[in-house]
Amino acid sequence: MIKVSVMYPHTPGARFDHAYYCNTHMPLVKSRMGESCRFYTVDQGLAGGSPDTPPTYIGMSHIFCDSVEAFQDGFGPHAAELMKDLPNFTDIAPVIQVSEVLVGRA
């Protein structure tokens, strides 16, 4: 299984609408990707590692897929539409990382 992390760096004065991201954007991602996206999570940054420091990322999502190919097949055909939605919730350029999930426990 792989995880595609889409992370939005905390930037003073930047705009990020968590409600839109959670309730509109990520459901749109899931609906376009279909079964290629097994599930996703959304995080809201609260604080950094030291007292009174801002979070490294103000928001992030993690899209779980069976493989890189599954992600590419599910996301690729809809990339332009999904990227066009970004200004509806943020003015921050995302940082993206693809990782292999080595351990997952409930």
Image (cartoon, grey):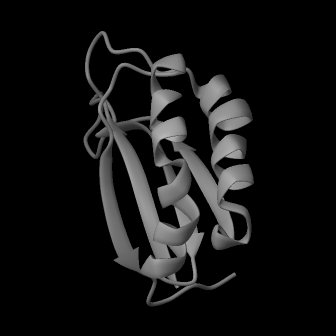
**Which residue is drawn at the image coordinates 63% and 35% (left, top)?**
25
For the point 46% across and 68% down, the residue is: 72
Above or below for 24 versus 104: above
User: Residue at 73% of width from left, 33% of height from top?
Assistant: 23
The answer to which quarter of the image holds residue 58 is top left
Above or below 65: residue 95: above
Return the x and y of residue 27 as percentages of the image width and height.
72, 44
Give the residue at the far top of this rendering: 13
Number of marks: 0
Residue 48, located in which quarter of the rendered image?
top left
- Whole-percent x, y for residue 17 in the image: 55, 20
Where residue 104 sits in the image (x, y, percent)? 57, 85
In the displayed structure, does residue 51 sit left or right of residue 79?
left
Q: Quadrant of the C terminus?
A: bottom right
Q: For the view shown, which residue lies furthest in the front direction?
A: 77
In the current view of this chain or complex, which residue is farthest to the bottom?
102
Q: Is residue 69 above or below residue 84?
A: below
Residue drawn at (36%, 19%) of the image: 91
Q: In this view, does 84 lie to the left or right of 24?
A: left
Q: Position of residue 8 (x, y in %)?
A: 36, 37
Residue 8 as seen in the image, left or right of residue 83: left
